[in-house]
Amino acid sequence: AGVNFRTAVAAFVPSPHRGDAVLHVRAGAGHALRRRAVATRSAVEGWDELVVAFADAEILAEEVCGFGPDVRVLAPGEVRDAVVRRLSAVLECHPLPQGVR
């Protein structure tokens, strides 16, 4: 209960590097992503740009969704699309109340 086995195993098994994702992360948020970042620089006010290596776009998208509005995916498109797909599915299951954007 409450254990994410995928994350637990991934911590011990090195994954092949498939690509780099470029993320905007709100200042003071996304600490797990910051620890894994291969590069970090200031972006627009209140946001930092991180480059995070990933092996699986779907797994990274799952992680990014957990940060809610504090993380934005700039590239690659496959990670961004996976995030949008997940968040759209949540909205389908749990629509916003009328009048809320």
Image: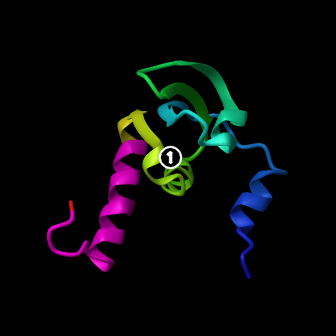
How would you rate the neighbour count of disc 1 (Cα within 10 Å): few for under 14, some for 14-19, many for 20 or more? many
Q: Is residue 26 left or right of residue 5?
A: left
Residue range highlighted in magenta: 79-100
Q: Position of residue 61 (x, y in %)?
A: 49, 51
Give amino acid for label 1.
Ala
Q: Is residue 97 above or below residue 11?
A: below
Point 32% across, 79% down: residue: 93
Residues 9 and 29: in front is 29
Residue at the outermost top position: 41
Residue 10 or residue 40, whichever sits in front? 40
Q: Is residue 90 magenta?
A: yes
Label 1 secondary element = helix
Residue 85 inside the magenta-drawn segment: yes
Seen at 33% across and 53% down, the residue is: 84
User: What residue did someone put label 1 on?
Assistant: 57
Residue 41 position, x and y percent, is 56, 17
Farthest residue, direction left? 99
Q: Which quadrant of the structure image shows residue 4?
A: bottom right
Provide the major secondary structure of the magenta segment: helix
> Is 46 placed above or below 68 here?
above
Question: In terms of depth relative to the viewer, which is nearer, 86 or 28?
Answer: 28
| Residue farthest to the bottom, as pictured | 1
